[in-house]
Image: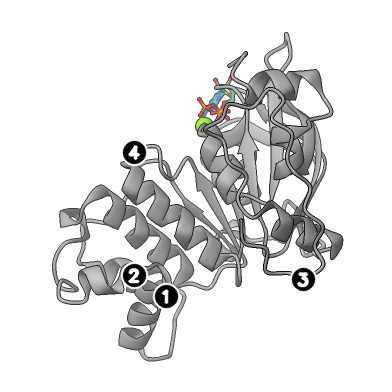
């Protein structure tokens, strides 16, 4: 295992309850990073999410740290999508949806009266489970959001820069005028990431971004995430335990109660969640005994 940071003490992860396939990448590097307290970008304060009278998520308090990858894991229906869709106000479009508690981005309450949800979505981008390029050319897919936002710079340059950052430029540089829908699934997902970063968000939310992809494309996206976290803060929902273990710095484990309301059981550095979780429910989940 490479440990770039000198002086980072290596703690051999215990293997209790964790399948051998799960490798904790660069644990030493992560532990060194964790010692430097990172700035909080998003803070959830006692946040509950309701669809009408149904409480889907209850009393979540979390801090999402800058330039880290936070993985959100937990059984189906525990409210992972609800929670991240709340973070960029996507759920505003669902009739009857409302929240209680507070959600802060850089200290600003995103559900404050004078906050424009469109502006929130510009600052907090989202990549979905199924790649969903627009039925437009590759170039237009990337330029679309920037155009709407009135981008005044060189659009060709922005498109190229965004595609390079999304590790897609070499694949598509001769196909810029072709339909984005004609790309492979993995390429389409990187196109959606390029489209998201073209508007320079602060945070990128990803809801199971690899679940429709093959293992090679999945690894490409994970490598891309590792690159992107130099500049962005990333929250990823995944059912893939190996992915959470490999790709994230912090993991949040959610489950749900008898009332089916999802809640956070534990948030901790990823290495701890997968090797030495504090809560038995977490241990059971990450070791595959539940969910
Ligand atoms: N638009 C909606 N209207 C009403 N209820 C909803 C809506 N979307 C989700 N729910 C309910 O909220 C709860 C949480 O759903 P959510 O999709 O957030 O779970 P999840 O953890 O993302 O699950 P999965 O892992 O299957 O994607 C579920 O009980 C679900 O039925
Ligand atoms: Mg979901």
**Can you see residue 37?**
yes
- Pointers 3 and 4 in contact (CB under 8 A)? no
**Can you see residue 86?**
no
Mark 4: secondary structure: loop
User: Which of label 1 and label 4 is nearer to you?
Assistant: 4
Alpha carbon distance from label 1 to label 2: 8 Å
Name the residue at 59% across, 65% down: 229
Alpha carbon distance from label 1 to label 4: 27 Å
Alpha carbon distance from label 1 to label 3: 41 Å
**Residue 193 against residue 51 in the figure, above or below:** below
Judging by the rendered image, the residue that carries numbered circle 2 is: 142
Judging by the rendered image, the residue that carries numbered circle 3 is: 6
Judging by the rendered image, the residue that carries numbered circle 1 is: 146
Q: How many marks?
A: 4
Q: Position of residue 37 (x, y in %)?
A: 86, 63
User: Which of label 1 and label 3 is nearer to you?
Assistant: 3
User: Which of label 3 and label 4 is nearer to you?
Assistant: 3
Looking at the image, is mark 3 or mark 4 earlier in the sequence?
3
Looking at the image, is mark 2 or mark 4 earlier in the sequence?
2
Looking at the image, is mark 1 or mark 3 earlier in the sequence?
3
**Residue 191 against residue 275 in the figure, above or below:** below
Judging by the rendered image, the residue that carries numbered circle 4 is: 212
Name the residue at 34% across, 78% down: 159
């Amino acid at each position: 295992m490479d440990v770039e940071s000198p002086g980072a003490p290596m703690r051999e992860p215990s293997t209790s309850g964790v399948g051998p396939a799960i490798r904790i990448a660069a644990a030493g590097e992560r532990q060194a990073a964790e010692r430097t307290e990172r700035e909080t970008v998003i803070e959830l304060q006692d946040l509950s999410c309701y669809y009408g009278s149904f409480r889907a998520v209850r009393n979540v308090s979390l801090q999402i740290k800058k330039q880290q990858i936070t993985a959100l894991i937990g059984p189906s229906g525990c409210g992972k999508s609800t929670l991240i869709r709340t973070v960029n106000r996507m759920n505003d479009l669902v009739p009857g949806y409302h929240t209680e508690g507070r959600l802060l981005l850089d200290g600003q309450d995103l559900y404050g009266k004078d906050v424009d949800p469109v502006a929130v979505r510009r600052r907090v981008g989202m990549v979905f489970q199924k790649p969903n390029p627009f039925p437009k050319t590759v170039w237009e897919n990337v330029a679309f959001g920037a155009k709407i936002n009135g981008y005044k710079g060189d659009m060709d340059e922005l498109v190229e820069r965004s595609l390079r950052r999304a590790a897609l430029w070499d694949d598509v540089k001769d196909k810029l005028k072709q339909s984005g829908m004609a790309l492979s699934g993995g390429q389409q997902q990187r196109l959606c990431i390029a489209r998201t970063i073209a508007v320079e968000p602060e945070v990128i939310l990803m809801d199971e971004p690899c679940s429709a992809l093959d293992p090679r494309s999945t690894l490409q996206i994970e490598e891309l995430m590792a690159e992107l976290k130099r500049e962005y803060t990333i929250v990823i929902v995944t059912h893939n335990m190996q992915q959470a273990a490999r790709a994230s710095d912090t993991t949040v484990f959610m489950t749900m109660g008898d009332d089916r309301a999802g809640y956070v059981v534990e948030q901790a550095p990823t290495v701890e969640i997968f090797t030495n979780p504090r809560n038995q429910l977490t241990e059971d989940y990450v070791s595959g005994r539940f969910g």
